[in-house]
Image (spheres, rainbow, N blue to C red):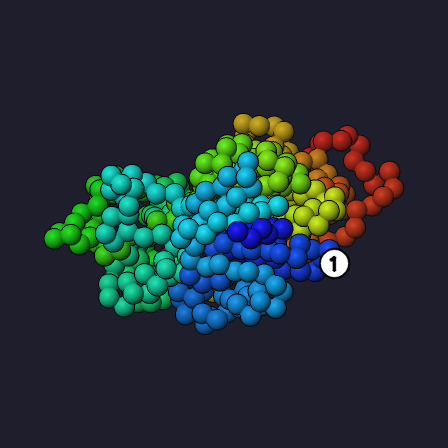
Amino acid sequence: MTEAELIIIGNGMACQRLLAELVQQPNRPTKIVVFGGESKPAYNRVLLSSLLSNELPDSAAELASPAWYAKHGIELICDDAAVLIDRERKLLVSRHGRYRRYQQLVLACGALPLTPGYAEDDSKQLLPGICHFRNWQDLATLRLAGRQRQHAVVVGGGFLGLEAAEGLRKLGMQVSLLQRGANLLNRQLDATAATLLQQQLSARGLSIFTNSEIDRLNYKHGQLQSVRLTSGQQLKADIVLLALGIKPNISLAQQAGLTVNHGIVVNANLQSSDSAIYALGECIELNGETFGLVAPVNAQAASLAKTLCGKTAPYCSEHAATQLKISGIALSSCGDIAALCANSNANADSFDASTDYLDAELFEYRRLWWRGPYLVGAVLYGDTGLSQQLSQLINQQQPYYGCRSSLLLGQIKPAPTDSAAKPAAAGQPQQDAA
């Protein structure tokens, strides 16, 4: 039985970014083995919706070819997920019976899609006509549905649900989208931006139902025919796509006896409760926070690569800007927008002022939230050119004492450093300069 200096479990985007960082390190582990559960090497899951809508060729999603792994001396084992970790013997067992010892182990297990009870049988298998949109097999399923079926119901008004709904519409299907709450993207947008988004998507032909949930699936001869909403309304459905969010995949870590909560609990060095085992990406929990965006996972990979090579490089979480990947619709969000909107009246510490700009005819909207002189949140709709600069202001937490209206309109100025430019009373709402 061979021993590897480093074994990585999971061959998704987090793993591939970690490998890309590791091969840049002069003293990287020489023997690296990767176990992946899918038949394909790592690919860019973010682009799945663009592949579904035929905006990009399948090759655009490739992150690394088998030749790349061979070039860097990395053993890639596809279609053979790890099923057991023996921490005492530092031993890994795969689904197809491979045994490998490790010196260091990294869990990049990703996340699992949330599935409501009505969508699965007693053995937790999806019912006929129900699917997720997380991997290459799901993409193939939806492409086939686009050729053979007419009516789709997408459950979930988050990024994935919206992008999948638009992809199915472009395949020629009649698509109904259900959102449990009152607004689309309710974690990223305020009500005004969400209204603009719903108007634009509806104009394209999507049927959007807010404050709506499925009550029952209706089958005939084993084929899905329709869904009944809690309101009693019936919608035709040949296929139901679930996009209700994700949960960290912690099953292997649990089996191994590692400390878990919502995710695999790690410290700032991305080290688990076992000093030889690390984790990154959607499967982890750090200081009570879990991660589902690309930017923080990439930052984790950069940090962990250095740590695995003997350097000290703790990971520090930041707010990442999120953007919708639907052609012709531009929006960006940064900060805890859901909390800012929910706490606008209930929590005086959440923020003390906001500034906004709206041109409903041009579908342009911007809103900034402030706590004293600090920018704490931003929503941009229509023109997202300020996204990177505003994200930096939010994450760097540098006070801004300039004209807020000018900032809103893209005329960002450096914060004055002289004391005369500072407000008379810290924490008070700042007025825009005339």
Disc 1: which residue = 26
Residue 94 in view, yes or no: yes
- How many neighbours does mark 1 have within 10 angstroms: few (below 14), some (14-19), or many (20 or more)? few
Q: Position of residue 127 (x, y in %)?
A: 25, 48
Relative to the observer, which residue lies in front, 60 or 213?
Answer: 60
Q: Position of residue 217 (x, y in %)?
A: 21, 45
Relative to the observer, which residue lies in front, 85 or 129?
Answer: 85
Relative to the observer, which residue lies in front, 393 or 240?
Answer: 240
Q: Amino acid at mark 1?
A: Pro
Q: What is the tally of numbered marks visible in this picture?
A: 1
Residue 126 as seen in the image, left or right of residue 136:
left
Q: Is residue 308 above or below residue 20?
A: above
Residue 403 as seen in the image, left or right of residue 379:
right
Q: Residue at x 27, y 41 (%)?
A: 123
Residue 160 in view, yes or no: no
- Residue 273, quarter of the rendered image: top right
Residue 297 as seen in the image, left or right of residue 224:
right
Q: Residue at x 73, y 55 (%)?
A: 27
Relative to the observer, which residue lies in front, 281 or 414?
Answer: 281
Q: Residue at x 50, y 45 (%)?
A: 92
